[in-house]
Amino acid sequence: MADTLWKRVTWQSENCLACKWFRPADPINADILTNGRCVHPELLKFNLIVSGRDWCNVFEEVSQKQIDAMQAKAMQAEE
Ligand code: SF4
């Protein structure tokens, strides 16, 4: 029975990992298990820590340009 239920679990695509308001703690290796801050202007006051697999109804898709910028900044910080 548990197997049957498990097979129905799917990750939706509109999760925090794919959202422009997600600031992962580790932008270089971010995946659905990575924690990070939500910086949506309406939600910022709650100081939310979310994971890549969380989601909410004000999701907005992140652009590849934004991902590249966050990763470049993180790589500079490591140097
Ligand atoms: S909580 Fe909502 S707004 Fe914040 S990162 Fe996740 S999907 Fe985006």
Image (spheres, rainbow, N blue to C red):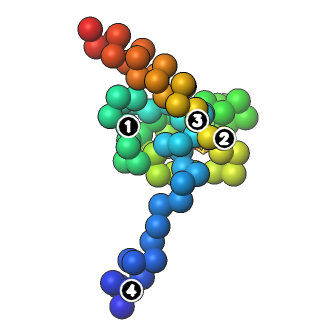
Q: Which residue is mark 1?
A: 30
Q: Earlier in the sequence, mark 2 or mark 1?
A: 1
Q: Which mark is residue 60?
A: 2
- Amino acid type at mark 1: Ala
**Residue drawn at point x = 66 percent, y = 33 percent:** 40
Q: Residue visible at 28% across and 13% down?
A: 78
Q: Which quarter holds ligand 1? A: top right
Mark 4, Cα crowd under 10 Å, few <14 / some 14-19 / many 20+, is few
Disc with the residue nearer the chain's start (2 vs 4):
4
Mark 3 or 4: in front is 3
Q: Give the labeled residue for mark 3.
A: 62
Tell me residue 64's x, y (percent). 52, 31
Q: Which numbered tag is attached to residue 4? A: 4
Real-space CA distance between mark 2 and mark 1, rounded to the nearest whole angstrom = 17 Å
**To which quarter of the image does residue 3 belong?**
bottom left
State the SS at label 2: loop
Q: Tell which of 49 and 54 is nearer to you.
A: 54
SS for callout 3: loop
